[in-house]
Amino acid sequence: MNLSGRNPSRPHLSRPNLSRRNLLAAGSALGAAAVTGPVSAGPAAAAEGGRRLRTGFEQLAADGYALLDGRRVGIVTNPTGITRGGAGSGGVRHIVDVMHEDERVDLAAVFGPEHGFRGTAQAGGSEGRYDDPATGLPVYDTYLKSGQPLADIFTASGVDTVVFDIQDVGARFYTYIWTLYDCMEAAQLAGKRFVVLDRPNPVTGRSAEGPVLHKEFATFVGRQPISQAHGMTVAELARLFNGEFLKTPVGLETVLMTGWKRTEFYDTSGLPWVPPSPNMPTPDTALVYAGTCLFEGTNLSEGRGTTRPFELLGAEGVDRHWAEAANALELPGVDFREAYFAPTFSKFQGKTVGGVQIHVRDRAAYDPVRTGIALLVTAKQVWSGFAWRSDNWIDKLTGSTQVRTMIDAGATSDEVVAAWQSELEGFRRMRAGYLLYR
């Protein structure tokens, strides 16, 4: 559906989109959340032999960067900010390199998130402040920065427009969406315009699943009360953040994709997969991550240090009984294999551990959050060494004490999942008003 009725091949501005709260509160243009680009999820123009999804950046470039005309631009991005070209175009390239070479764009700064702009840092790290060797552009570190300190970085960079283009994986505790939130808040404080270039949710945008964060558990792995698997794109999340959670909305514009359907997984998009972080090597990893990342909150390995992180789980002393218990639940769309592995780093580095490997056989039926809960329940049942991390990190990942205390009390996975349904339905109703694709 094209909201403006204009030519869907060119990005355009439509009327502002605000929640009722912000319509009452906003008294200036900073309250606007303009949508740029078509909202249609139908087939894009045929190219290179088939339907071609066009990302927000590719839409922006196709329009000659008109949205950035006369602006001094800084961009928040990482290695996933790529674009494709045809023969003679140099193949898959980073958008910073492309824009830096284009005289139509005044690109003045780059802002790197966790893992860094070029992606060299492991979890919990960043690349710091440096000048990019390829372009000479100053690269500023945003990791763990928010509020006025981050606003001061935007001011010091000399930009007037901040652009965001990072591939998300669809889980609340994946930090890039909170970099988005923090940068939106900081851009508002610094008086900067904010533009989001959209990319697919790689595990579809069919529905929201899992527990909803309680505000008292807000951290960088969850700033605001959204569900564990949100089922939204970054442009949709930006509109939701602006409409529901930011005290003062930022001047927001979003450049949408064409050719994306909410039911599609990443490997149907035609886009190359660039790991968004070192332990997200494939779209298969993203598919299970919203559930098995919960094992970061336990003393079991979540598969870091293996070639299948978040698909392999285990610990010393775990044997075939875990896979047997998990398979006995007959969870939809998934099977479990008894597995043994030796992580090269992180938990159990250099030691052989036993556990399970997740094999998704029907990804349309598969529910990663329910599966993650079931694996926690069965691991505790079959392995006497099971323990939560001493800092109760599991509460920050799930968003409350509910999952941990229910599992400790002997609840089944179905009982745990049932306990969050009321809050989940409330989030789904809120979410519905911000979806941009059919």
Image: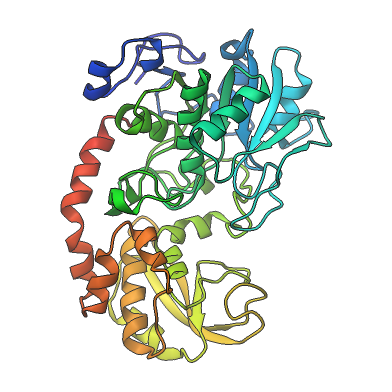
**Can residue 189 be seen?**
yes
Image vertical order of residue 304 relative to residue 73, above or below: below
Does residue 247 sit above or below 329 in this rendering? above
Q: Which quarter of the figure has residue 409?
A: bottom left
Rendered position, 299 above or below 132? below
* Residue 388: quadrant of the picture: bottom left
Does residue 388 lie above or below 290 as drawn? below
In this rendering, would 387 be left or right of 328? right
Q: Measured from the top left, where is residue 380 in percent x and y?
A: 34, 83
> How many tags in the picture?
0
Quadrant where the C terminus is found in the figure: top left
The residue that appears at 30% across and 51% down in the rendered structure is 216
Coloring scheme of the render? rainbow
Q: Residue at x 19, y 46 (%)?
A: 425
Which of 125/422 is in front? 125
Q: Is residue 15 left or right of residue 106?
A: left
Position of the N terminus by quadrant: top left
Q: Nearer the viewer, residue 176 or 272?
A: 176
Residue 290: x and y in percent read 41, 58
Tell me, yes or no, if residue 54 can be seen here. no
In the picture as drawn, the residue positioned furthest to the left comes out as 422
Task: Give x and y (percent) for residue 363.
Answer: 40, 58
Q: Is residue 311 left or right of residue 91?
A: left
- Residue at the image point whose x is 31% and y is 77% from the top: 377
Q: Residue at x 71, y 52 (%)?
A: 120
* Position in image of residue 99 (x %, y %): 71, 23
